[in-house]
Amino acid sequence: MDKREKTWLGVLIIVALAVNIITLTPLVPWQEWLLWSNPTPTATYAIEVADYAFRFPSPEMQARVGEYVEFVATSSDVTYGFGVFRKDGTMVFQMQVVPGHENRITWKFDQAGTYDVRSTEYSGPRHSEMFAPDAIRVIP
Amino acid sequence: MTTAAPTAPSTGLGWAEKWTLRFAIVGMLFLALAGIEGSMMRTQLYAPGALEGFEQALSVLRPGGAAATSEDLYYAMLTAHPVVGIYGFAYLCVMGAFYFLVPFLLKREVRHKALVPVNFWAQIIGVMICWASGFFGLFNALYTLYWPLPVAYDRVPVVASVTFVVGAAIIMINILLFSFNLFSTVLSRSNPGDYTLGQFLRSAFGISRLMKWLGKEDKSAPNLDYNGLSPFIVAVARGSIDTVINAVVLLTAGVLILVYGLAALFGSSLNTLAVDAVVYKNWFWWGLDMVADGNVLMYAAGTWYLLVPLLVGRKLFGESVVRTVILVDLLVSMGVWSHHLLGDRVQPLFMRLLSGQFVTWGEFFTMGLTIFAALMTIWLARPVKFTPALKFVLASIFGFIMGGAAGLIQANLGLNVVFHNTQWVVALHAHTFLLTGLGSLLFAVVYALLPMLTKLELKSKALVNVHLWFWLFGSVTMAYAGGWSGVEGMLRRTIYYDGMYAAFQLAELVGAGLVAVGFTAFLVNVVWTLGWKNLVGLLVPERARAR
């Protein structure tokens, strides 16, 4: 192997290690609970999805800033997505909702307010209708 | 602007040259069709309802078309679009190029010449059946075909589901025939190398090289890596392994969908939960991802290994490392599929982390070393002449770097939480790979092969530069506008009726316009260079010409 190739390979190794290490640590905030710890949620919300519609638990899904909540989504027909969005449209998190399975994700919100839910996976021509504004309320 | 001759002379194109040009030209027509589709869909995203009049006019052509909604049409087009772009444009161009280059480099003829026109027509027919399943039948399950959506007949038309699968099966069987012909050509006994199938597969899989690493080189087995086969041929063979796996896996998925479709047509409803959606998704993505991570990257790498030394007149830098890369990439491409399932919380964590993230980073090394070899070859050959082909080779390297970096960001266990299924994925990763990367590379091949095939010089260097810069700026504009909208939360495959991301869509439309100008400059230049007489000659079947 040529010296220049070795140098270049060294650069590639350093970049790969740096990016992987950084993104696996809690420098990406949600890695703290999605990867490194297994926190006990203060509340669990079951969401059913079918026929292009979310069925949320009543009266509403509520969380407190800094506390862990778990969302368990199930589908009885096709694959959907469960995505939580801020009011400005940016995404907080998401997961796929695969039929025949319980799809679970735990989250810790860091800002109070209301959040929208949108399906993040195509499920047929009416997919774009799957938008639920103010579906989650996060209180201080 | 330079002119080689006042009118293009008749070139007396040979059989192989004519077929290569036919593949390339029809491939480019499919690219134009994909571009029109993409622009229409982007218009719909920018201003939902803007195409209503056009839709109504087209509905006259559809059986029961009046009942179709804008969403039906949008998602049917979105389903056909990648089939047209990948299996129409990219595969036809690859078939045409390889059917010329592989025999040319091995100094022999294509082993089964009768298969060449079969491949040509079957690919066109297969793609057009898929396209028609969308255009006329409104098939809308997307290319991902996530189970059980393609058999959910409350939202996917059953007849179109069956016809789409038939079209896809024709494409996949045709790709298997093409791969068989490529392997068969390399293995042909008319060649002085006279390789056996086992020997050739050892080369393609890099087994001999692996054994040498382990200090157990089998000296009785000819090590084809070292003895004669160019890195291009080895890379083509390596990429073809992925092509075969891709075709076989998609065929199995197609058979499954077909069984459900035929049962529905005969009035019987099969249980969709009998097939586990996660197992299906793993199997499907394992095969489908071979197109992107093995096939496209390896074919692209092989083409760089071939073109760069040819264009700069210098031996490929680090050829030994390149051969190792070909081996390692096989292992990488076999294990990367889980990056498509990072959003699936039911996929085991170790699979998401190992296959989804770490193995995907293997491509950072294989492509990083490949691109380094190509760029070092150019650097060490200075001063080099920036021919049209070399300019597009550099553009393609830029595209693969940009698209690859975007891909690594989304194929990350942590970052995928906010990138999965956003416009980032489809714009900054997929379309950058396909337009800036693969598209530019295929243009480089056309610019390199055209003089070899026809003995004609390109009519206009100015048009080449217009093609280069408009294509490059347009595709990059599209990529970054789309990528930025993804960062802002815009999902792919979703129509927003509130105009939330309209500014990004407008910027992407401007980018698409620039791409169209560049592509038009390319077409004008090629037609001008070939001349009408040669172009019409391509339409005349060989038998008619012989008579």
Image (tube, coloured by chain):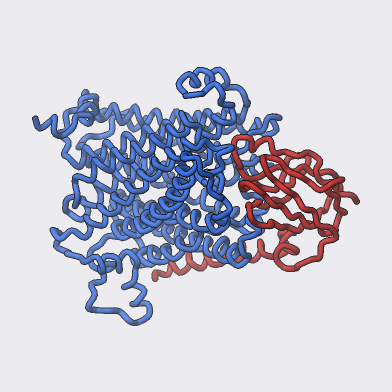
Chain colours: A red, B blue
Given residues A78 and B497, the one toward you in this image is A78
Q: Residue at x 23, y 56 (%)?
A: B184
Q: Is residue B386 visible?
A: no
Q: Residue furthest front?
A: B267
Given residues B98 and A37, the one toward you in this image is A37
Q: Residue at x 50, y 37 (%)?
A: B158
Q: Residue at x 59, y 39 (%)?
A: A124
Q: Residue at x 56, y 26 (%)?
A: B68
Q: Residue B234 location in percent, x, y?
A: 31, 60
Quadrant of the image occupied by residue B380: bottom left
Given residues B426 and A51, the one toward you in this image is A51
Quadrant of the image occupied by residue B471: top left
- Asked if residue B492 lies left or right of residue B120, the reply is right
Query: Looking at the figure, which quarter contains the N terminus of chain B?
Result: top left
Q: Is residue B45 above or below residue B341?
A: above
Q: Is residue B547 above or below residue B329?
A: above
Q: Residue B392 location in percent, x, y?
A: 39, 43
Quadrant of the image occupied by residue B19: top left
Q: Is residue B55 visible?
A: yes
State how many labels appear.
Answer: 0
- Asked if residue B13 lies left or right of residue B381, the reply is left
Q: Residue B24 location in percent, x, y?
A: 31, 38
Q: Residue furthest bottom?
A: B215
Q: Residue furthest left?
A: B547
Q: Is residue B464 above or below residue A94?
A: above
Given residues A52 and B346, the one toward you in this image is A52
Q: Residue B56 location in percent, x, y?
A: 53, 19
Query: Looking at the figure, which quarter contains the C terminus of chain B?
Result: top left
